[in-house]
Image (tube, coloured by chain):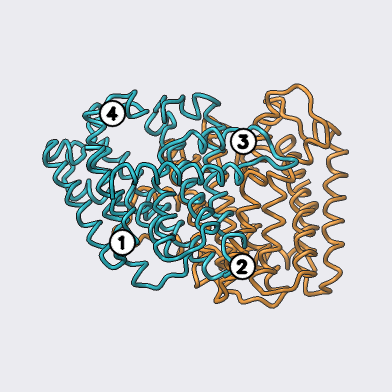
Chain colours: A orange, B cyan
Amino acid sequence: MSSETYTTALAQTAAEFDAALVGLLANQDNDVPRIWDAMRYAALAGGKRLRPFLVLISSDVCGGSRASALRVAAAVEMMHTYSLVHDDLPAMDDDELRRGLPTLHRQFDEATAILAGDALLTLAFEVLADPATHADGQIRAELVLGLARAGGARGMAGGQMLDLEAENRAVANANEVIRLESMKTGALFAWSCEAGAVVAGAGQAERAKLRAFGAEFGMAFQITDDILDETGDASEVGKAVGKDSERGKATLVSLRGLKGARDAALEHAQRAVENLDFFGEKADLLRAAATQLIDRRV
Amino acid sequence: MSSETYTTALAQTAAEFDAALVGLLANQDNDVPRIWDAMRYAALAGGKRLRPFLVLISSDVCGGSRASALRVAAAVEMMHTYSLVHDDLPAMDDDELRRGLPTLHRQFDEATAILAGDALLTLAFEVLADPATHADGQIRAELVLGLARAGGARGMAGGQMLDLEAENRAVANANEVIRLESMKTGALFAWSCEAGAVVAGAGQAERAKLRAFGAEFGMAFQITDDILDETGDASEVGKAVGKDSERGKATLVSLRGLKGARDAALEHAQRAVENLDFFGEKADLLRAAATQLIDRRV
């Protein structure tokens, strides 16, 4: 698949996804406007919508319904967005810029950012558990369980805790960094792909393959992100850069150098793609996503 | 029912509940210790466990299984606990004392308090969605949906947003205060009772009655809480008092005086109890809870 075909598919999917997300974040009668304004500010600020793309294409690969997959994709993106909002807070990473705009607590205030993050996280589960997502309650419950595991103390939130702890320690080794990044980033990518299979009603084999793809994809993504933090500039990346080394935070870049990190990212992307053999050409867009990750970002 | 019988039942149920909660918050291999320590610090600090009590007794009233109801009660209490942790943060209510102990961000730090709150919120949904809670996925999904609605932007989180906004405005009327308190406190109490019916597989009539009981109970609870903020002392209440008037925050106490607020609490408690006729004596512990609320707290 050409890089252009992939880029077009990604952009079209993002536009379709954004329209669905706007609907899920619309005010209703009697709503408190400020918290919804803040939720929309954070969630509708653009972004490549890579996790939603992975949900949607994974569901396609397994023959799932687009309407159902869009709701699952929205839940995953709400989870991701809330984590950005909270990670940006002064008590956490203290970031002023996100996707080229002031972070939520700079645009509104800290209390609103905390609450809007909480509400986005909660809404993610509300969306999944709603019968509109799937007629089968068993599948809805499984979607909730998987997202909660990916996002919670044994996944993303625990990874962020490790990340903050790592700032206060002089030494970290590559194994610790890999564990941290697989919790902080890998778990939600792995779940994005698996969730597409779950909502499509796919079997265990499909689920396992897509999950493995997503986990490796997530690691490749995070390492390229760390490389960009070292080599990119803020206007291009849309957020502050150079923060990892400024904070003495260990990444594969600091531990293995740029070349070592590039090699590791490439290796994860290759391992990701190996899991797609099972699906034949139906998975070409997922293959292209892994390839593009390396070509464009590193 | 004598006040002693009720007090004993409440304490016994709290002990049984705490044992279940300890199990759900136990470290597993490879966990990040700090986030779990913080989650346990917040969740296992005692408290009357009123919401869990309401879940458990509502389930009993509908003939539900205790093991299932304990998990639902744990999820509700995790939701409640996370809201306390985040509300106590410096950017929100800036409280130093909670249940007689330093608040989580004082004992650990702000970042840990934000993350541990996020993780407790997420774990609440994980617990509900787990097949261990109920064999029927439809019921698990319904439990998730109800908790998310009670806790999110149209419930508790939205109520807290309104509460913060109210501090910045000179005027508030009783209708606004009632709306705020029914979102901030009433929604989770209403859901606690309804969830007991849901996990017991009860019909719509039982659900509606228990929900209505819980909503009125929650309003009575919140008003008595506001009265205690005005009349209690910190050592007795276990948290700082007098903060509402210090902040110029309108409550029924400031709008209608102590007597007016007491009358309103009594009225809500009476309306709560009217919903229990349907269940006969099986609901005596719920009746006692509403009566005790007024006798002990106001």
- Say what secondary structure mark 2 lies in: helix
Look at the numbered disc 1 and give the secondary structure of its residue. Answer: helix
Residue A83 position by quadrant: top right
Chain under label 2? A
Query: Can you identify the residue that label 1 sits on?
Result: B281
* Camera-side mark, 4 or 1: 1
The residue that mark 2 highlights is: A12
Q: How far is the residue under mark 1 from the one under mark 2?
A: 61 Å
At label 1, counting other C-alpha atoms closer than 10 Å, the crowd grade (few under 14, some 14-19, many 20 or more) is: few
Subunit bearing disc 1: B
Quadrant into which the N terminus of chain A falls: bottom right
Determine if residue A117 is in view.
no
Vertical order, A17 against A225 (above or below):
below
Q: Position of residue B263 (x, y in %)?
A: 13, 45
Residue pictured at 36% horizontal, 52% vertical? B189
What amino acid is labelled 1 in the image?
A: Glu
Circle 2 residues within 10 Å: few <14, some 14–19, many ≥20: few
Name the N-terminal-most of marks 3 and 4. Answer: 3
Residue type at tag 3: Ile
Q: Are marks 4 and 1 in contact (CB under 8 Å)?
A: no
Badge 3: residue crowd in 10 Å (few <14, some 14–19, many ≥20): many
Question: Could you tell me the amino acid type at mark 4?
Answer: Lys
Front label number (1 vs 2):
1
Horizontally, residue B165 falls left or right of residue A154, namely left
Using the image as rendered, state which of residue A223 and residue A230 is in the foreground: A223
| Disc with the residue nearer the chain's start (3 vs 1) | 3
